[in-house]
Image (cartoon, rainbow, N blue to C red):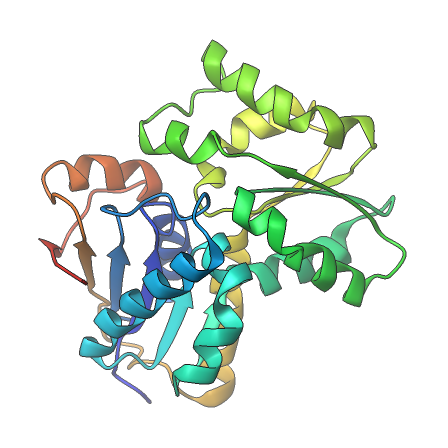
Amino acid sequence: MDRRPIGVFDSGLGGLTAVKELRRLLPHEDIVYFGDTGRVPYGTRSDGTIVRYARSDMDFLLRFDPKRVLIACGTVSTVALKVLRREYDLPLEGVVEAAAAAAAARTRRGVVGVMGTAATIRSGEYERLIRAAAPSVKIVSVACPLLVPLVENGRTDPEDLVVSTVVGEYLAEIRAAGADTVVMGCTHYPLLERAIDAGMDGGAVLISPGREAAERIARALERDGAGNAPDHAGTSAYYVSDAAEGFAAAAERFLCEPVSGVVEKVDVE
């Protein structure tokens, strides 16, 4: 038994989709979430800047002595995870490895589409991991820089003309390739799941990185006997690097439930 919390961080609020899955799977675990809302988005930054930001995010979470950290950011998971694993002596789970493994296992026609931030696509990490598991799979990767700003501004309705137009444009190449599986390669993107599903005419399996990573953590805690007491009611604490006002309303869209627990602005620099 390990009563320490699970730490989670993301460049903004998208990582809350992973927190939602952790809460569903592990209701007895305490969770500390940091959203770097003051420096979002990460996906347009240089690799050096992303690594620097990720280190400061990790250093903040270490104040809470987490037993494990989920890097709920596709960009950090592709660009900085290897660096962080060398520098920090605790289990780190990224969202990319889990999502890539799921995509390789679930494709039936052997064609996978990957949607991600510019940095995620530039890294080529999804292609490397998917091909390691399934060498014959064809992969079509598309950078989608407008999707995070849409989600952060509450524009997720598939009936919204802007949303459907932008999502449709990004999916055009993936559809043309005949993909039967699409990786929503950023934890913001599950809020656009209905729009992405509509853009694929309901004909593709959609992979949520946060969901896949949360399931990996649940299995690891069970395997290692590192879970909290089963009769403990898990708590959540939320920290952001920009104004905390309005956080609860925005976070509810990601969590699909009211926010309870600490909400606080912190300075990680």
Residue, x 31% and y 47% (percent of image)?
Answer: 12
Is residue 22 found left or right of 207 in the rendered image?
left
Q: Is residue 89 left or right of residue 248?
A: right
Is the residue 130 above or below the residue 169 in the image?
below
Among the 4 quarters of the image, the one containing residue 140: top right
**Residue 42 x, y percent position in the rendering:** 40, 48
Pick the residue in front: 132 or 121: 121
User: In what quadrant of the picture does the C terminus appear?
Assistant: bottom left
Residue at left 34%, top 51%?
11
Count of marks overlaid on the render: 0
Residue 253 in the image: x percent, y percent?
31, 36
Residue 13 at what x, y percent from top left? 31, 45
Is 220 above or below relative to 201?
A: below
Which residue is more in the foreground, 114 or 80? 80
Q: Is residue 119 visible?
A: yes
Residue under the image location 24 percent in, 36 percent down: 250
Instruction: List the single residue furthest toward the right.
Output: 136
- Residue furthest to the top in view is 161
Say above or below: 31 vs 138: below
Report x, y in % for residue 75: 49, 54
In the image, 116 versus 246, the foreground residue is 116
| Quadrant in which the N terminus is drawn | bottom left
Point 14% across, 36% down: residue = 246
Res. 25 visible in picture: no
